[in-house]
Image: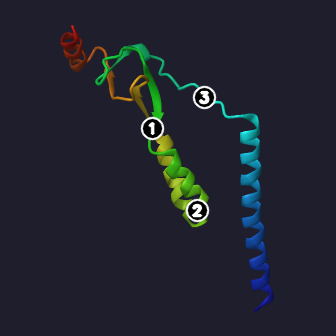
Amino acid sequence: MKFTDVLEYIALMVVGLGFWVLLIWWLVRFFRKGYKPAAPAVPANAASYICTVCNEKGHAVFKVKGSGMIEAVLWLLVLSWPFALVYSIWRRTGRLVVCGACGGQVIPVDSPAAKRLAKAAD
């Protein structure tokens, strides 16, 4: 075993240990403060949307694409960091506008489909 191989091994061990130390430190800080979920982000024109599932008007919220659990698992698996980076960027490239009441698809109030929904509800 060469001296450079030993140095590479030690460097990898320090980086790996540093990652786990930072992760544990972040988790301790996160749970010590208590988890307070953020209020859902609301579009500026939320009142101009109607839900196609529950016919609620004005309850539109933003939702991030994909799954946070899949993203967390990808980041925790050391060999999948390139995939985790691509997945994280993809998740944040576009937000979906969904119904805040049921999570269904929303459409603009002035669209023909929304007018048909309003007539059917009456």
Q: Report whether 39 appears left or right of 49.
A: right
**Residue type beneath disc 3:** Ala
**Residue that label 3 marks:** 38
Report x, y in % for residue 32: 76, 39
The quadrant of the image that shows the C terminus is top left
**Residue that label 1 marks:** 94
Question: Which residue is depicted at the point 75% across and 78% down?
Answer: 8
Report the Cα–Cα distance between label 2 and label 1.
Answer: 25 Å
Q: Earlier in the sequence, mark 2 or mark 1?
A: 2
Q: Relative to 84, does residue 33 appear above or below in the rendering?
A: above
**Residue type beneath disc 1:** Gly
Q: Report whether 122 appears left or right of 25.
A: left
Q: Residues within 10 Å of mark 2 (few under 14, many from 20)?
A: few
**Residue type beneath disc 2:** Leu
Q: Relative to 83, does residue 121 appear above or below in the rendering?
A: above
Image quadrant where residue 80 sits: bottom right
Report the Cα–Cα distance between label 1 and label 3.
Answer: 19 Å
Question: Which residue is depicted at the point 48% across and 44% down?
Answer: 91
* Label 2–label 3 contact, CB within 8 A: no
Looking at the rendered structure, the secondary structure element under dot 3 is: loop
Which of the two residues, 93 or 50, is positioned nearer the viewer here?
50
Q: Report whether 16 appears left or right of 115.
A: right
Q: Relative to 39, does residue 27 appear above or below in the rendering?
A: below
Report x, y in % for residue 67: 47, 45
**Residue that label 2 marks:** 77
Q: Earlier in the sequence, mark 1 or mark 3?
A: 3
